Amino acid sequence: MSEYGFEAEGLVRRFGGTTALDGVTLAAGRGRVLGLLGPNGAGKTTVIRILATLLRPDAGRATVAGFDVARDPARVRERIALSGQHTGVDEELSGRANLVMIGRLLDLPRRRAEQRADELLDRFGLGDAAGRPAAGYSGGMRRRLDLAAALVGRPEAVFLDEPSAGLDPGRRDELWRMVRDLAADGATVLLTTQYLEEADALADAITVIDGGRVIAAGAPAELKRRIGGHTIAVRLDDPADAEPAAAILAAAAGRAPDRPSGTELAVPVDGDDAFYETAARFRAQRIGVTELSLRLPSLDEVFHALTGARSDARSGSTPPDSVKAAR
């Protein structure tokens, strides 16, 4: 048995004269969650479609649950679930009938298919709407039904392409719990998302792609460290202290701080010495703060640094050394 829930090596896929994937390599161990990040058009959905046997790569190889996606597509399909960006439910059927139908297509006995449908409808908060045609569901309800449909067969690998789209914050939290439960039960999850806090919360590892190529890979904390340094973040008691506080931060960091609001300032620094220096000067000048912290970059900052540097490289400018190293 392969140690990986899925893996891909050197994937290339072209559509006419456009190269969507140009040598993508990634892997996730069984029971792990891999976040696949990148700007629109980076190739994320193409990766998922290859792993789900919906596309054949022009070059490279990929396996899911130990089976080659090109040589053994039927065995791969028996072991996966896919929830794409657009729901695939039958709108004329009720929510319950949709799930029972999928269970029967997966060769579950009718009674077991009905039990599984009821379990998932309750889990996704759709029990009260189970008997209603899906055509009358809201967008968020359809998304939840589509996610439930992907889980009917208890898959070994689950591919979630922007699963939170259309979900309110409460339902998104439920989805997060379900993704963690899937991994705890041994399923391997590939997650693409536009919500970087979602990847930060769920992913054991992250692969960033842009222009069809992998530009960075690693655990979230590792990627944050690669971008370099820390950030001093300040929230002031009094907006009138903004200018002297900005001067202190600029002296410590060698650059002007960002100002998200009238009382918030932030600036990247190389180490913790600048933080202690800043705290001492704030105290000496009696500048009151609600918050003063030293933190690693957020995943949003990592993402924008990586993909922004990639855009600079395409336009002919040189990315910073930290981004070159991340590649």
Image (cartoon, rainbow, N blue to C red):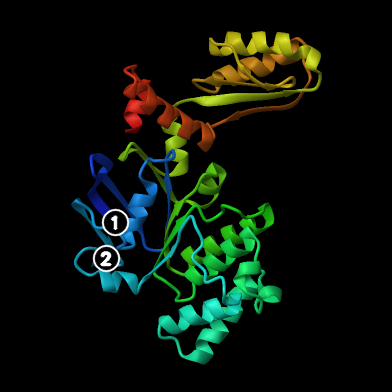
Q: Is residue 257 above or below residue 98?
A: above
Residue closest to the eye, 119 or 316: 316
Total numbered labels: 2
Tell me if label 2 and label 1 are in contact, CB under 8 Å.
Answer: yes
Query: Left or right of 157: which side holds 19?
Result: left
Q: CA distance from mark 2 to mark 1?
A: 10 Å
Q: On residue 7, which mark appears?
A: 1
Q: Quadrant of residue 21?
A: top left
Q: On residue 2, which mark appears?
A: 2
Q: Quadrant of residue 245?
A: top right
Image point (52%, 45%), residue name = 200
Residue 313: image x %, image y %?
33, 23
Residue closest to the eye, 43 or 250: 43
Residue closest to the eye, 315 or 1: 315
Q: How many residues crowd around disc 2 within 10 Å: few (fewer than 14), some, or many (20 or more)?
A: few
Q: Is label 1 in a helix, a strand or a loop?
A: strand
Residue 277: image x %, image y %?
62, 15
Query: Left or right of 116: which side holds 238?
Result: right
